[in-house]
Amino acid sequence: MKKSILLLSALALLVLNGCGGIKGLLLYKTDPTLERITEVHTLPMSSSVGFEWKAIEDKRIHGINIYRGLPTDRFKTDQGFKRVGSVGNRYGTHFVDIHVKPSTTYLYTFTTYSFGKESKHGAVLKVKTQPPFAGVSFVQAYKVAPKVVKLLWKPHSNERVNAYIIERSVNGGEWKYMALVKGRLMVEYVDGRVRAGNNYAYRIFARGYDKIRSQPSQVAHISF
């Protein structure tokens, strides 16, 4: 019982302190007199989208809510959008959405809020994230023993890369994960799980610090 009371008290404090995550659980009534955000600049990357807008002049405003949806959503009068973040004061003019996927189109809209009420939604922004970055430029498979394959590839030129994901296909089958090779300059992988009479194909994905994968490398083939 004491644990439940403490948990409820902690949640109440988070709401009172204006925690962005808790605001996502609140329901707002619409106040058409509150200032709207009508102009937003966007900067889409492959794994994030940055936003910038002009400072809010309305002194009643306590913060800004950010909503996101998909073009496939069926929405009417702002339905179908999900609140994905909040800026906790009217002086804030930037927000970054890091929960997006490469090569994907999203819809965004913004509101301002004050004492449990929010403005009407601003214009709907259509934003497409950038595709994954270029993959490893060279990869080759070598037979180094009767049942051993050695993969060598060229280090990725992007210094954000910190690992490589190795995938393998056997006899034209589906691609399966084999290993995670850590370090941008670590450019070899040894596969000792091969058998005679099979055809093997390998491909590599570079992975950045943000866990985003590159495009796949060219496919390296080898037969036993």
Image (cartoon, rainbow, N blue to C red):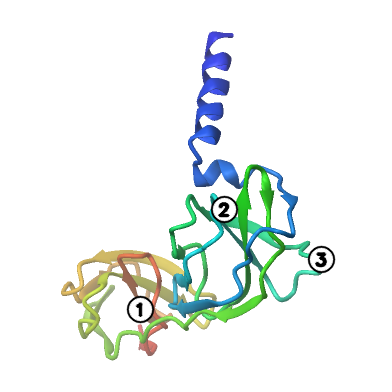
Q: Which residue is mark 1?
A: 204
* C-alpha span from label 1 to label 3: 45 Å
- As drawn, the label of residue 41 is none
Q: Mark 3: few, some, or many residues within 10 Å (few <14, many ≥20)?
A: few
Q: Which residue is mark 2?
A: 61
Note whether 112 is above or below 117 in the view shown.
Answer: below
**Nearest to N terminus: mark 1 or mark 2:** 2
Under circle 3, the secondary element is: loop
**Nearest to N terminus: mark 1 or mark 3:** 3
User: Which picture quadrant has residue 216?
Assistant: bottom left
- Determine contact: label 1, label 2, CB under 8 Å: no
Q: Nearer the viewer, residue 18 or 74?
A: 18
Q: Nearer the viewer, residue 68 or 101?
A: 68
Name, please, the residue furthest toward the top: 1
Q: Nearer the viewer, residue 154 or 10?
A: 10
Left or right of 185 in this view: 1: right
Residue pictured at 38% horizontal, 81% vertical: 203
Residue pictured at 55% horizontal, 35% vertical: 15
Amino acid type at circle 2 is Ile
Give residue 62's position: percent from left, percent from top: 54, 49
| Mark toward the viewer: 2 or 3 | 2
Left or right of 104 in this view: 52: left
Amino acid type at circle 3 is Thr
**Nearest to N terminus: mark 2 or mark 3:** 2
* C-alpha span from label 2 to label 3: 22 Å
Left or right of 114 in this view: 99: left
- As drawn, the label of residue 77 is 3
Under circle 1, the secondary element is: strand
- Determine contact: label 2, label 3, CB under 8 Å: no
User: Which picture quadrant has residue 149?
Assistant: bottom left
Q: Mark 2: few, some, or many residues within 10 Å (few <14, many ≥20)?
A: many
Residue pictured at 62% horizontal, 77% vertical: 125
